[in-house]
Image: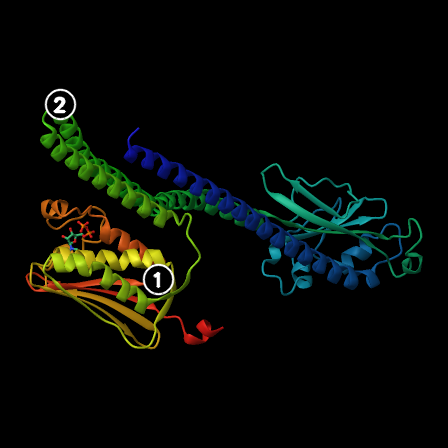
Amino acid sequence: MNGYSLFRRSRLRLALWYAGVMGVILSVSGLGMYRAMVQTNWAAMEREIESIAGTLHDSVEPLLPASEEPTAVLQQIFPDLCLSGQPCKATPTLIQRHTIGISDRTTYYIRLFNHQGKLLAFSPNQPLSLPPTLNRSSWQTFRTANGIRYHQFTTILHSANTHHLANEANSSWGYLQIGRTLEHFDAEIRRIQWIMAIGLPIALSLVATSSWWLSGLAMQPIYQSYQQQQQFTANAAHELRSPLASLLATVEAILRIPQSNQQDMQIMLHSVERQGRRLSHLIADLLLLTSLEQNSGAKPFQPCCLNDLVSDLTEEFLELATAADINLKSQIPTCEVYTLGNESQLYRLVSNLIANAIQYTPRGGYVTVSLVKSDYTAVITVKDTGIGIGLADQERIFERFYRVDGDRSRKTGGTGLGLAIAVAIAQKHQAILKVESQVGKGSIFTLEMKVLSSSILTN
Ligand code: ADP
C-alpha cells in the first residue's frame, strides 16, 4: 500500500469516527430535548386541566342539590349542559364562562356523574364515542374512532349537604369530569417530529462533511512530516550511495593491482580511508540530527560561558583559516556572558558556522566572530566576506542535504547537514538562527539566545 492511500484510509477512518461520535451525541441530545419538550408541554396541559377543574369544582359544589334525582336542579345550575336521556341543544357556553383566560375554550368538555357513576349531564362538545359509564381513575387518555386523542381528569363532588361527610365512604355527591382534545398537542408533537426527521439527517450530513474536512486538517501535518521523512530517507540513501560506490570501486581497483605496486596501493588506500571517513562523518551527522529531534540522551542544560566558546573556537579554527589564507578574528566583550544550554551542542553549532564561513570565503578574505550582549539576549555573529548566498537559497540552506553548489560543497567535505543540525540545536535552546547575505559580498549568520542573569549564576 502506498503512503497516499494509507493516509486516505486513515483520514476516512478518522472522519467516520468523528461523524459517528458527533452523530451519537447529536441524536442523543436531540432526543433528550424532544422528550423534555413533550414532558413540559404535557405537564403544562395537565396543570391547565386541573386548574379549570378546580375552578368549576369550587363554583359548582355549593349549588349541588342533595336529591337522588337531581336532573331538574342541574338544569337550573347548568342550563348549557345536555342532560342524560334528554334532547340536547348544542350551544356550549357554560364551559366558556368557567374557563376565562384559556386560549382555546372549545377544546374542553365537562361531564357530571352521580356517585354510582351514572352520567347525569355533559357538554355538547364531548367526544361522541365516550361511554356513559364512569372510569374513576383521575387521569385518562383515550383515542376515539376518528383517531383524535383526548385527555381527561375526574374529581369527586360533594354537595353542601354531604360535605361534612367528605372523609367517609360513599360520601360523594358525584363526579365532575373535565377533558380536552389532544389534537393541537399531537399536531405540535408531529411538527417537532418532522423537524427532527428532516433536521437530524441534514445535521448528520453536515457533521459528516465537516468531519471529513477536519480529519483532513488533522492528517495534513502528519502527511507533511511523512513526506519529509521519505524525502530525508531518499536523500540519506543518495548521499550514502556515492561515497560507498567510489569506495567499492577503489577496493576493486586495489584488488586488481599487482602486489609489487606498493606506491599505487598506498594512494588508493588513502582514498579508501578518505571515503570511509566521509561516510562515518555523514552517519554521525545523521545520528546527531535524529537524536536532536528525538531529544534522546540529552544532558540537562547548564550555564555555558559564551566568551569562552567564541575564543576557543576562534583559536581552534585559526590554523585552518591561516592555511586557507583567511583572516579570522574575534570580538568578545570584557564582561562574561552566560547562557543556559548544552555546551557541546552550542560548540557544534558555532563551529559549523565558522567552518562554513572559512569554506565559502576565497583566499585573502575576512571572517569575524563576535559576541554582543544586551539586557536579556546574547548575539553571536559570524561574518564573512565570502561568495554569499542568493535570496532564494537563503530560505533553503537550513533544509537537510540542501547545498547551493552541490559539487563544490561535496568536494570540500560538506554533507549538507551542517546548517540543519545548527538550526535543530538553536531550536532546542530556544535561540534564533538567521542569515543575511549578498552574493559576491559575504554572509552574516546571527545566533540570538537568552542570557543567564547574573543573580542566577551567583546562587
Ligand atoms: P555543507 O556541509 O554543504 O556546508 P551546510 O548545511 O553547512 O552544508 O550548508 C548548506 C549550504 O549553505 C552550503 O552547501 C553552502 O552552499 C551554503 N552556505 C553555508 N554557509 C555559507 C557561507 N558562509 N557562505 C556561503 N554559502 C554558505
**Residue 253 percent coordinates (x, y):** 12, 26
Q: Secondary structure at mark 1?
A: loop
**Left or right placement of residue 380 versus residue 262 in this view:** right
**Residue 378 percent coordinates (x, y):** 31, 71
Q: Which residue is mark 1?
A: 430
Q: Quadrant of the N terminus?
A: top left
Report the front residue among 95 and 256: 256
Report the front residue among 206 and 71: 206
Report if residue 413 is visible in the image.
Answer: yes
Q: Earlier in the sequence, mark 1 or mark 2?
A: 2
**Left or right placement of residue 50 versus residue 254 in this view:** right
Q: Residue at x 23, y 51 (%)?
A: 418
**Left or right placement of residue 413 versus residue 80 in this view:** left
Q: What amino acid is at disc 2?
A: Gln
**Left or right placement of residue 306 versus residue 395 in this view:** right
Q: Which residue is mark 2?
A: 259
**Residue 33 percent coordinates (x, y):** 55, 51
Using the image, tell me which numbered label, if any, was put on residue 223. none
